[in-house]
Amino acid sequence: MSDTVDFSAVNRAALANFSAIVTRWLPGGRFAGHEYSARNPKRNDRNEGSFMINTRTGAWSDFATGDKGGDPVSLAAYLFGMNQPDAARKMAVMLGLEAGK
């Protein structure tokens, strides 16, 4: 796998099926149009509501903490505690854009 990753290509590929991705990463949430609300696994949420993801654009925000990002790669980095280049590489493999090592 290359050391460089095309963030735009990874984000485009993720957005093509982002609804399925976010429900896999954050099960038990709810859709309201293109917005997905879920419990934030990074904090002790009991109910969904303050953690919102736009499945059309990839923008996301936790309105309770102020954490936010603008694309699927930044969401993966946030949820899985990694930097964005590593998150993009792992997503590229998940999406079939690159072969894993």
Image (spheres, helix red, strand yellow):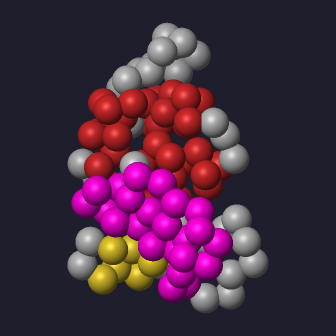
Residue 85's image quarter?
A: top right
- Can you give x and y, in whole percent of width and height, for residue 40 in the image? 62, 71
Q: Is residue 70 above or below residue 8?
A: below
* Magenta stretch holds residue 63: yes
Q: Locate the C terminus by quadrant.
A: top right
What segment carries the magenta color?
Answer: 48-70
| Residue at 41%, 67% in the rendered image | 53
Seen from this angle, which residue lies furthest front? 66
Image mark count: 0
Can residue 42 be spotted in the picture? yes
| Residue at 39%, 30% in the rendered image | 7
| Residue at 29%, 49% in the rendered image | 15
- Can you give x and y, in whole percent of width and height, for residue 52 in the image? 45, 73
Q: Is residue 24 above or below residue 32?
A: above
Determine the main secondary structure of the stretch shown in magenta. Answer: loop
Q: Is residue 46 above or below residue 19?
A: below
Q: Using the image as rendered, state which of residue 26 and residue 58 is in the foreground.
A: 58
Can residue 96 be spotted in the picture? no
Q: Going by the image, does 36 lie left or right of 1? A: left
Seen from this angle, which residue lies furthest top? 2
- Can you give x and y, in whole percent of width and height, for residue 75 in the image? 51, 52
Q: Using the image as rendered, state which of residue 28 and residue 64 is in the foreground.
A: 64
Q: Is residue 5 above or below residue 26?
A: above
Q: Going by the image, does 17 lie left or right of 64? A: left
| Residue at 25%, 60% in the rendered image | 56
- Can you give x and y, in whole percent of width and height, for residue 96 in the image? 37, 30
Q: Using the image as rendered, state which of residue 53 and residue 29 is in the foreground.
A: 53
